[in-house]
């Protein structure tokens, strides 16, 4: 595992990325001598193609373009939201006997 200063990494970024991809090396990128990031190779243990992995694992049931619930259910949700809505915050009144002194 090699250490690379951030300025050197900035100048040689593409070269270091190629080394990581080809030789499977790992680099620690430092800033003022302290490690801040690690450049590591991506895992390549996939044997299946990415696209089409879920083929034949999903079954369509019913209308997939229609609404999930009937319109009447939305009215119930709206009523529930209205009942459980937080009360609006009130600003404290500043009367003659307020705790904070007034600005002059």
Image (tube, grey):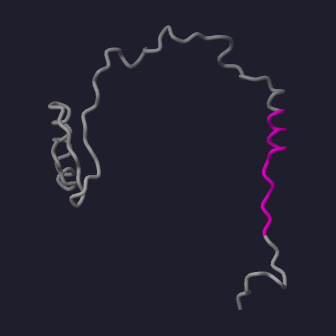
Residue at screen point 25% across, 57% down: 34
Tell me how many marks there are. Answer: 0
Left or right: 64 with respect to 17?
right
Q: Quadrant of residue 65?
A: top right
Is residue 88 rendered magenta in the image?
yes
Left or right: 30 with respect to 88?
left
x and y percent of residue 4 in the render? 17, 50
Nearer to us in this view, 65 or 80: 80
- Identity of the residue furthest to the bottom in this view: 104
x and y percent of residue 61 in the render? 65, 10
Residue at screen point 78% across, 69% down: 91
Nearer to us in this view, 67 or 29: 29
- Identity of the residue furthest to the top in this view: 56
Q: Would you place residue 91 above or below residue 96 in this image?
A: above
User: Which residues are the magenta region?
Assistant: 76-91
x and y percent of residue 73 in the render? 81, 28
x and y percent of residue 38 in the render? 26, 44
Question: Where, quadrant-wise, is the C terminus in this rendering?
Answer: bottom right
Question: Where, quadrant-wise, is the N terminus in this rendering?
Answer: top left
Q: Quadrant of residue 19?
A: top left
Residue at screen point 68% across, 14% down: 63
Left or right: 87 with respect to 52?
right
Nearer to us in this view, 58 or 14: 58
Q: Would you place residue 44 above or below residue 81 in this image?
A: above
């Amino acid at each position: 595992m090699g250490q690379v200063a951030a300025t050197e990494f900035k100048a040689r970024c593409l070269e270091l990325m190629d080394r990581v991809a080809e030789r499977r090396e790992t680099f620690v990128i430092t800033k003022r001598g302290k490690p801040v990031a690690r450049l590591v190779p991506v895992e390549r243990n996939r044997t299946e193609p990415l696209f089409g992995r879920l083929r034949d694992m999903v079954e369509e049931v019913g209308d997939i373009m229609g609404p999930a619930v009937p319109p009447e259910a939305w009215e119930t949700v709206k009523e529930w939201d209205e009942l459980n809505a937080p009360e609006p915050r009130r600003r404290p009144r500043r009367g003659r006997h307020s705790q904070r002194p007034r600005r002059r």
